[in-house]
Amino acid sequence: MLFPRLSKRVVYNPLSAMSSPAPSSSNTQSGNPMPANQGHDGRWRAPRGNLRQFWDRVTEGLQLNQLWFQFRQDARTSFRFYRRDFEAGSPSEQRKQRGTFHLLQELAWAILGKLTPARRVLLLIGVILLLLPSGGLQFHKGHSDIQISWGDPHFWGGWLLFVVLMLEVADRVVMKRDLEIARDIQGWLLPATPPLVPGLTIAFSTRPANTVAGDYYDVFAREGSAPDENHFLMAVADVAGKSIPAALLMATFQASLKTLSITPCSLKDLVAGMNRYACCNSQGGRRFTTAFLAEFDAASRMLNYINAGHNNPILRRAAGTIERLENGGLPLGIQQDAPYDQGQVSLSPGDWLVIFTDGLVEAVNEFDEEYGETRLLAVLETNAGMSPDLLLQRMITEVNAFVGSTPQHDDITCMLVKAA
């Protein structure tokens, strides 16, 4: 019998190291310091500092409750994303008649539909390998036993799932980088600070539901007005949809508004021109835009406005009465020759004008209750003596407290105007 050739090696045995006597104090004092990961009793100690740094790097310094809160948000958002697909495949009446197995089957197909065909095959093979028993199968036929051995398939199943995960992560990283670039470009289209408007104090804020948003806001001087006139345009718009398609249409809205506002035309002609341009890019009215456009004359303190299917802005007079600015017409991009009515109000000192998108009042909590205009009016009534920037912060804080851990499902934009 042949034996393998042996070579002399020195093998470190941690058990023998732990059982060996602890170094004496004389050795420690004579220039042989004790290792940092070894205690006075000679036992090995885990490097707590390294583990702490590793954990902080993985969690980015978040606490356990913050991690759990983030996980709940991600889980709810993902579930809504997949549920929207498989609910669209069958009406609610059919889903109620079908059993749990069919619902799980539709959910599985919704998940598989997000993968490429090659990744679907890898995912299915990985799941099958995870379900196979370890070692193999044994059959008994007659006087003989048939055994099929395939080792441990769980390792290969987990490896295939890891490969699919890495491929999806790579796509996500590339997409996230592109979305961050798009977010930066979109940020250039929106004003960073409100301009100085005679007789008005303005504050605005927006928060996208995704990386990029379909909401738009702006306040700028009307370049097409006469030199001796001091006119300012106010605009708040909401493109139907979210994410990249809505962001692209928002950019076209901004471009058309800036271009048409240079021409010396009335507000009605300006809105009519923007509607014609929007109809050329609305895919037959499916990609429409709700907008509130107003022109403020600082000399007369008159505000001419057109509400194109947008949420009615709230005008709170200094005496406490509430008015709604609702004159206008259809959203932009639905009907090319749609007529628009123009409204006019005068802003007196102490008046508040609140212009917002539906994401603010339609924000829901975990009980599926909407924030609503009633709560918004209550915050405005209670804090009417604040400055617009402080009142805007208070409104956002109240909305956040109401929503809690429920994921934001729509973009939120709000503009506050106070007449001085």
Image (spheres, helix red, strand yellow):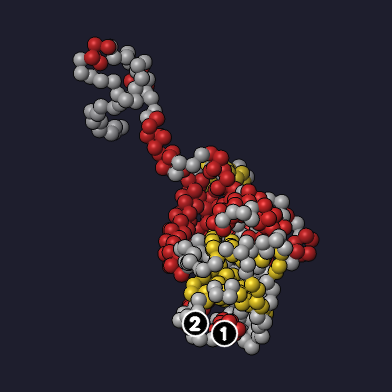
Query: Measuring 55% from the left and 47% from the top, which residue is drawn there?
Result: 70
Mark 1 or 2 closer to N-term?
2
Residue 144 vertical placement versus 384 (above, below): above
Q: Measured from the top left, where is residue 209 in percent x and y?
A: 56, 60
Seen as rendered, the residue at the extreme left is: 30
Q: Measured from the top left, where is residue 115 in percent x and y?
A: 53, 63
Q: Check disc 1 and report its element: helix, strand or loop.
A: loop
Answer left or right for 272 relative to 4. Answer: right
Query: Disc 1 residue type?
Result: Ser
Query: Measuring 48% from the left and 66% from the top, which residue is drawn there?
Result: 196
Q: Measured from the top left, where is residue 82 in percent x and y?
A: 62, 60
Residue 263 vertical placement versus 84 (above, below): below
Query: Measuring 29% from the left and 32% from the top, which residue is drawn there?
Result: 3
Comparing 136 with 157, the one in front is 157
Q: Which residue is mark 2?
A: 225
Q: Quadrant of the C terminus?
A: bottom right
Residue 86 in view here: no
**Residue 37 position by quadrant:** top left
Residue 416 vertical placement versus 17 (above, below): below
Q: Check disc 2 and report its element: helix, strand or loop.
A: loop
Q: Which residue is mark 1?
A: 266
Q: Quadrant of the N terminus?
A: top left
Query: Disc 2 residue type?
Result: Ser
Q: Residues within 10 Å of mark 1 (few under 14, many from 20)?
A: some
